[in-house]
């Protein structure tokens, strides 16, 4: 637990985020347009998958975060909740797997932005197979994100706001273009009962897991609870508003792509931008592609920024607890940020981007990063939902906002979320149908996951031994 001598570090944190800031933060981190293209490429059955993922994962997750944030509005969120429910080891392991899972997420989401940005330039697609271009884009973006967040959330939050608009505007433009396209050419996809029925086979397993992955992110704001104005009430309100926007955008965006184009024409790292390009070419509106491409790049940067700024708070609180070097728990006296934790996390993201290109093509590196992110990313949610159930034994604070129905509904929703999370982890292990070495792909993901979890356990036990001696 936190040592009294280090409580002063938290007091240096500055409460910079209000309701509007936090709502945009959730949208920037939660609404990634790469998943709209991924969903549309799988056909009209994805609409029901979106609805299923929303009801059986996103709603339980948002309800759990809403209640746990109201109960314990402390810096670290997930770390604090799991620690309170199951002890220090579980709290550290939940935080460790979460922050490690986001390291491959950074280059993955920035690769999408880099691929989309190429559509803004004449002959830009010549760089589409150039790994050094994607790598340079990711490294530069991570460096800028790290520096701005070190200087404070008053600067870093603008990346989140820009990222949120980078998702809203393309969705709105997509809806308009799709409407015009349907009016002039008719729907490119037939929506029948057969085509909208999801096929529960191995070929679609990885797709199901990525759709659930798309709905993650609403837990991140709570990692910065002591940097949010009136966190106990601001977090639930921002969650509700952003949650409605996220679900509506994913479903409406997928439908819009499908009515404008056949699913076979939507694929790849730059799938969303390439689909927009085809749609605009048919309508004689090619100039819109440049605008969309720029906003898509901003969307990916905003997503990376939101996860880097929030997730870096997990090693910060672990540093305060001395399970990581105490330097991680220091706050800059002038900027009011855990600057060492942020810098370390940003550099680690850059290192992951470098490693992702070792001996891989751009597409294979992208696919591996996504698969690794999904498996390790969902492990902390197992802890979160279990903590939600366990902590029902403690009284709910007055004035807090919780999901209607009290304890019974809270346990039910957490149980549904837990089952869905475990199922998603299993589905994420299934390699895509076009993977030539399926056994090797599964071995890579399992091996990296066990190595990651084992590394976290080793770090914790080593720190505990040092504290005792």
Image (cartoon, grey):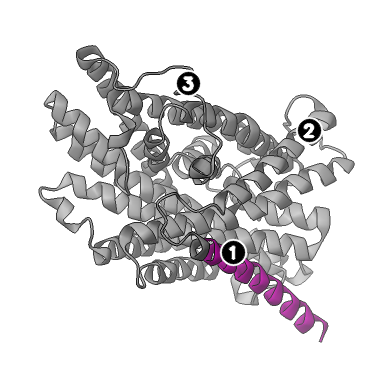
In the shown orientation, is residue 197 left or right of residue 391?
A: left
Outermost residue to the bottom: 469
Point out which mark residue 194 bears: 3
Q: Residue at x 51, y 29 (%)?
A: 247
Q: Which residue matches tag 1?
A: 446
Magenta portion: prevailing SS class: helix
Q: Secondary structure at mark 1?
A: helix
Q: Is residue 456 magenta?
A: yes
For label 2, the residue is 412
Say what secondary structure mark 2 lies in: helix
Sequence-wise, which precedes: disc 3 or disc 2?
A: 3
Residue density around tag 3, few if under 14, some if 14–19, many if 20 or more, within 10 Å: few
Location of residue 292 in the rendering, given as x and y in whole percent from the top left corner: 25, 37
366 sits to left or right of 15? left
Q: Which residues are magenta?
A: 442-469
Q: Quadrant of residue 332?
A: bottom right
Q: Residue 361 sits in which quadrant? A: bottom left
The residues bearing labels 1 and 2 have C-alpha atoms spaced at a distance of 30 Å
In the displayed structure, 433 sits above or below 416; it is below
Which mark is in front, 3 or 2?
A: 3
Is 406 a magenta residue?
no
**Label 3, label 2: how far apart the Cα atoms are:** 32 Å
- Name the front one of labels 3 and 1: 3
Q: Which mark is residue 142?
A: none
- Which structural element holds mark 3? loop
Q: Taking the image as drawn, is residue 376 in sight?
A: yes
């Amino acid at each position: 637990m936190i040592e009294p001598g280090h409580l002063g570090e938290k007091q240096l944190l500055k409460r910079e985020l209000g309701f509007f800031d936090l709502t945009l933060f959730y949208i920037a981190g939660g609404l990634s347009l790469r998943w709209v293209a991924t969903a549309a490429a799988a056909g009209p059955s994805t609409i029901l998958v979106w609805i299923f993922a929303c009801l059986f994962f996103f709603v339980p997750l948002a309800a759990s975060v809403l209640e746990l944030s109201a109960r314990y509005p402390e810096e670290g969120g997930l770390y604090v909740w799991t620690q309170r429910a199951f002890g220090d080891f579980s709290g550290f392991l939940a935080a460790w797997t979460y922050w490690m899972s986001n390291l491959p997420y950074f280059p993955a989401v920035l690769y999408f932005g880099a691929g989309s940005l190429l559509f803004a330039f004449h002959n830009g697609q010549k760089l589409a197979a150039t790994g050094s271009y994607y790598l340079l884009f990711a490294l530069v973006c991570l460096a800028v994100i790290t520096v701005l967040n070190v200087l404070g959330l008053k600067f870093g939050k603008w990346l989140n706001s820009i990222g949120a608009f980078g998702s809203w505007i393309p969705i709105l433009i997509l809806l308009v273009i799709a409407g015009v396209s349907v009016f002039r050419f008719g729907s490119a996809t037939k929506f029948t009962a057969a085509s909208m029925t999801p096929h529960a086979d191995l070929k679609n397993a990885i797709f199901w897991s990525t759709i659930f992955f798309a709905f993650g992110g609403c837990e991140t704001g709570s990692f910065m609870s002591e940097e949010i104005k009136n966190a106990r009430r601001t977090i639930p309100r921002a969650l509700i508003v952003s949650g409605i926007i996220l679900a509506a955008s994913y479903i409406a965006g997928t439908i819009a792509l499908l009515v404008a184009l056949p699913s076979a024409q939507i694929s790849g790292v730059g799938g969303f931008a390439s689909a927009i390009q085809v749609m605009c070419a048919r309508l004689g509106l090619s100039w819109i592609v440049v605008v969309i491409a720029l906003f898509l790049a901003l969307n990916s940067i905003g997503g990376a920024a939101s996860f880097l700024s929030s997730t870096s708070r997990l090693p910060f609180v672990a540093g305060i607890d001395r399970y990581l070097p105490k330097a991680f728990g220091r706050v800059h006296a002038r900027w009011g940020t855990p600057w060492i934790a942020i810098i370390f996390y940003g550099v680690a993201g850059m290192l992951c981007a470098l490693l992702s290109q070792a001996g891989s093509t751009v597409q294979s590196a992208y696919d591996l990063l996504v698969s690794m992110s999904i498996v390790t990313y969902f492990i902390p949610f197992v802890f979160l939902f279990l903590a939600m159930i366990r902590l029902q034994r403690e009284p709910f604070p007055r004035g807090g906002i919780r999901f209607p129905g009290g304890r019974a509904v809270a346990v039910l929703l957490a149980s549904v979320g837990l089952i869905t999370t475990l199922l998603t982890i299993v589905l994420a292990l299934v390699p895509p149908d076009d993977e030539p070495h399926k056994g090797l792909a599964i071995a890579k993901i399992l091996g990296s996951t066990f190595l990651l979890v084992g590394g976290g356990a080793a770090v914790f036990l080593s720190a505990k031994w040092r504290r005792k001696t």
